Image (cartoon, rainbow, N blue to C red):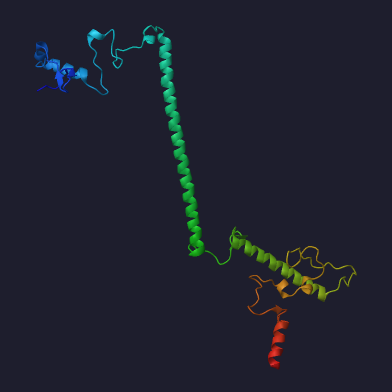
């Protein structure tokens, strides 16, 4: 039985295919019982990331894997300052590369974090808007009109703009009524001093008083033009009004006559 750590013997394959082992000498057999010799043999033959044992007899020709080995181009290099400078530059370059790598990693991590925060904020905003529009969440303390009674301003929303437009339309309609009443009830000049009387000035409006129109819009259009078809002046369903009276279309009158004749 061969003990662990004993020096291996070269094998020779004979012509018959048998492995012939060279016999050990007496000195080798005596050394196999020496504990120190076995430990040195194990240290010399070990593999892995360990220090490579170099025999003192091979100091002039060490193994390239050992720490005693030195390339030929470095054996006669006596400029220690340049070598030290190269080593320091190499260490500095490695440190800078490591810092740059960490900087890029932190930047990408912060960028992803901010993107995630923005996406989360947008998702939360969409969720709140959906709850407001679909489920009417958060409307317990909301007033019926999109108007702030404290600062007397309209809300910056779609309802606020709608309410502002309707209020402006109501003001224009009231001024048109005032102008019509003044025109029908008074003359164009002052009877006391004979000067021309100043009438009510109605501002331009896209529907009720468009630019370039002359005269009273009330006399040119029906109630749908004056009272509008929005929230403030929406007519009753099925009732076409003009000055408060129901207007029956001719088609309905013709159909009524036919039905009566039949």
* Residue visible at 41% across and 8% down in the picture: 79
Residue 61 is left or right of residue 101, and the answer is left
Q: Looking at the rendering, which quadrant does residue 37 occupy?
A: top left
**Picture coordinates of residue 159, whole percent (x, y):** 59, 63
> For residue 49, what is the image quadrant?
top left
Along the line of sight, the residue nearer the viewer: 27 or 148: 27
Callout count: 0
Tell me which residue sits at (48%, 53%) in the image.
Answer: 123
| Along the viewing direction, whichever of 34 and 191 lies nearer the viewer | 34
Residue 45 vs 222, above or below: the answer is above
Decide if residue 200 is on the left or right side of residue 112: right
Q: Is residue 30 visible?
A: yes
Task: Classify the position of the C terminus by image quarter.
Answer: bottom right
**Residue 5 seen from this side:** no
Q: Position of residue 253 (x, y in %)?
A: 71, 86
User: In the visual, does 261 lie left or right of 95?
Assistant: right
Q: Residue furthest front?
A: 15
Query: Residue sitting at 72 percent across and 86 percent down?
Result: 254
Q: Among all residues in the image, which is located at the extreme right?
A: 194
In which quadrant is the N terminus drawn? top left
Rendering coords of residue 134 (x, y %): 50, 64
Tell which of 147 and 22 is nearer to you. 22
Rendering coords of residue 12 (x, y %):
18, 18
Residue at horizontal 48 percent and vertical 40 percent from the top: 111
């Amino acid at each position: 039985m061969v003990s662990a750590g004993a020096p291996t013997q070269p094998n020779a394959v004979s012509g018959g295919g048998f492995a012939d082992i060279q016999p050990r000498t007496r000195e080798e057999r005596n050394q196999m019982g020496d504990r120190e010799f076995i430990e040195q043999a194990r240290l010399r033959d070990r593999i892995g990331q360990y220090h490579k044992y170099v025999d003192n007899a091979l100091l002039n020709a060490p193994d390239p894997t050992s720490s005693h080995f030195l390339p030929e181009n470095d054996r006669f290099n006596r400029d220690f300052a340049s070598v030290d400078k190269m080593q320091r530059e190499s260490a500095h370059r490695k440190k800078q590369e490591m810092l740059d790598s960490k900087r890029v990693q932190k930047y990408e991590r912060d960028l992803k974090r901010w993107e995630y925060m923005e996406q989360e904020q947008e998702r939360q905003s969409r969720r709140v808007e959906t709850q407001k529009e679909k489920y009417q969440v958060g409307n317990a303390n909301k007033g019926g009109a999109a108007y702030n009674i404290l600062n007397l301003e309209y809300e910056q929303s779609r309802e606020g703009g709608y309410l502002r437009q309707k209020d402006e339309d109501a003001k224009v309609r009231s001024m048109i009524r005032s102008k019509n009443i003044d025109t029908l009830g008074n003359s164009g000049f002052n009877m006391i001093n004979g000067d021309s009387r100043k009438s009510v000035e109605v501002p331009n409006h896209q529907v009720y008083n468009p630019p370039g129109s002359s005269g009273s819009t009330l006399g040119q259009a029906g109630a749908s033009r004056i009272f509008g078809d929005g929230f403030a002046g929406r007519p009753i369903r099925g009732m076409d009004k003009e000055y408060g009276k129901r207007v029956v279309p001719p088609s309905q009158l013709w159909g009524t006559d036919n039905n009566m004749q039949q």
